[in-house]
Image: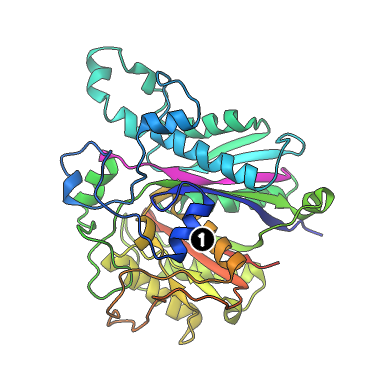
Amino acid sequence: MQRRVLITGLGTISSIGMNIEETLDSLLNKRSGIKKSKNLQSVHKDDFVFGEIPLTLSELKDMLNIPQHEAYSRTSLLAMLAAKEAVDNAGISDINKYRTGFLSASTVGGMDRSELYYSDFLTNDTQNKYIDSHHCGDHTEKVADLLGIKDFTSTISTACSSSINTIMFGARLIKLGILDRVIAGGVDSLSKFTLNGFNTLMILDREHCRPFDETRSGLNLGEGAGYVVLEADDIIEKEGKTAICELKGYANANDAFHQTASSPTGEGAFLAMTKALKLSGLNKDDISYINVHGTGTGNNDLSEGIAMKRVFGENIPPFSSTKGYTGHTLGAAGSIETIFGALAIKHNTIFPNLNFVNTIEEIGIRPETDIITNREIKNVLSNSFGFGGNNSTLIISKI
């Protein structure tokens, strides 16, 4: 019989919390982390609001006891903090007792440092140590070294679906018997590159984003990291551990409609959701809550709404976008929101879609705007959709 894949540990850092406890408190108290930036070095930083973690690079290094002169990007430091919390949260004391892998995702890698020192690279060698930390895989290697993982590492970069894809990959490795457990997730830090890129696309909101609202005008960029510990059911049974939830279904689909836009029929999102449901063995009526991708852009929310209506008809489960809390954390979004889904299951709570007022006329559906408690949350579906039509869906379930 094929192994079941269970989630035993969670770790996250974002603008709404330095850890799981702080994050849950912010979610329950509708406390958004979106505000003006303190750390971003850009001429445009005062034009927008961000989901920024209010710590400097120096402060993050101090938290990890890393000497200030060593070449660690902000991306690497955020990943290290979140991944370490996930391992501790899972109660893992010997990382190499079982075959363990680390899979991580990022879209900007160490660009938060290398973009600052680009001119230096060209004229002198004072900051050349940051050249090697530029690529996305550098943070993966640094986290693996921190945790002592030797069996398997890999880095995925598929835009904003990146970290959900690491979780899928990890589940497959466990089911195939290649690994026994995997720490999977993703990280991204704010950078001038992403700010300038999204600003050029004209999909940034200068105020707080309003996912699924008729007046939505763009997203808020955020930063953060999120990791889950995936373990095979036989390992959990052998260790006498208790899991948080089960990873029941997952799927990735690509509609190849446009470099940045979602298709008007929501084809990629529709395929990802329907395939994830099929793999899970659940019916569409079994879904208790959907954490939607919900960026707050005109194109994404309409396309995702159309896809949900195609999948669920007129009986769409309660849904919300949590990007009004954290902003869009890009490659980290999928894993951070999978963690939110796990917290929803654990605490029988649906977190609200902040800043929603007016229904989108074309689809006529409304997200949840208040915290819903004392309702059993059995199955959570989480969507993450990336540029290029790379669409991914996960389903996690109460055990």
Q: Quadrant of residue 97?
A: top right
Q: Which residue is drawn at 32% across and 68% down?
A: 211
Residue 394 seen:
no
Number of numbered markers: 1
Q: Residue at x 47, y 81 (%)?
A: 316
Q: Residue at x 30, y 13 (%)?
A: 126
Q: Residue 300's x, y, as percent?
A: 33, 66
The answer to which of 352 and 197 lies nearer the viewer is: 352
Residue 149 as seen in the image, left or right of residue 215: right
Q: Determine whether 367 is above or below 165 in the image.
A: below
> Which residue position is annotated with label 1?
340
Q: Residue 103's x, y, as percent?
A: 57, 42
The C terminus is located in which quarter? bottom right
Q: Which residue is drawn at 38% across and 18% down?
A: 129
Question: For the residue labelled by badge 1, is the local secondary structure a helix, a strand or a loop?
Answer: helix
Amino acid type at circle 1 is Phe
Q: Residue 78's x, y, as percent?
A: 45, 39
Q: What stretch is highlighted in magenta?
A: 178-192
Q: In the orientation shown, which residue stands out farthest toward the bottom?
A: 314
Residue 371 seen:
yes
Q: Does the magenta stretch include residue 182?
A: yes
Q: Residue 43's x, y, as percent?
A: 15, 40
Residue 205 as seen in the image, left or right of residue 396: left
The answer to which of 141 and 245 lies nearer the viewer is: 245
The answer to which of 238 and 392 lies nearer the viewer is: 238
The N terminus is located in which quarter? bottom right
Q: Is residue 397 magenta?
A: no
Is the residue marked by circle 1 packed among few (<14), some (14-19), or many (20+) residues within 10 Å? many
Which color scheme is applied? Answer: rainbow
